Image (tube, rainbow, N blue to C red):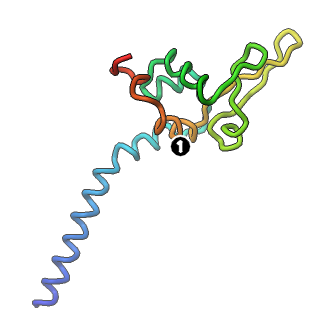
Amino acid sequence: PASLRRLLLENVEKVIALEARVEADKPKVEFHDAYLNADGLYGLQNAARALNCRPNLFIRWLKEHFLFYQGGNLVARVQYIQSGVFEVKTTIVDDKVRPQAFVTPKGLGYLDARVPDDVRVGRAA
């Protein structure tokens, strides 16, 4: 009986620790399920909204670090396209190719970890 009691207490302690970890990881799991596990691409303003950021400040921050203008259109830098943060789609308008940058679901997680606090909604500008 003493050894069974000891094993039971060890298992109860493990279950309590695992339940605490599940509870602590809940916000990360919800973010993953809502955005990172998604199939679609996000326009720059929609990505800002998904990350709870001010769209204009978010896009300005992206221009400083991740994007550049190519013929009047915002395009992601090559290293961020290759790493899967952005995807560039092209359309033909008036016989001209128009590239457009989109944020991937993986990119939302990448950018969420790096976006400055002053770009987020509810923070001082």
Residue in front for this viewpoint, 101 or 61: 61
Amino acid tagged 1: Asn
User: Is residue 72 toward the left or the right of residue 30 in the image?
Assistant: right
Horizontal and vertical percent position of residue 119: 44, 23
Farthest front residue in view = 64
| Image: 93 above or below 108 | above
Left/right of residue 26 with respect to residue 77 in the rendered view: left
Report whether 16 appears left or right of 110: left
Image quadrant holding the C terminus, namely top left
- The single residue placed furthest to the left in the displayed view is 2
- Residue located 47% across and 35% down the image: 112
Q: Is residue 101 left or right of residue 98?
A: left
Who's the residue at 39% across and 45% down the image? 28
x 20%, y 83%: residue = 7
Query: Dot 1: few (<14), some (14–19), or many (≥20) neighbours within 10 Å?
Result: few
Residue at image coords 23%, 75%: 11
Where disc 1 sits, the SS reads loop
Quadrant in which the N terminus is drawn: bottom left
Locate residue 31, reporting x and y percent: 43, 40
Which residue in the structure is indicated by mark 1? 37
Task: State the image quarter where residue 101 is shown.
Answer: top right
Q: Position of residue 46 (x, y in %)?
A: 53, 22
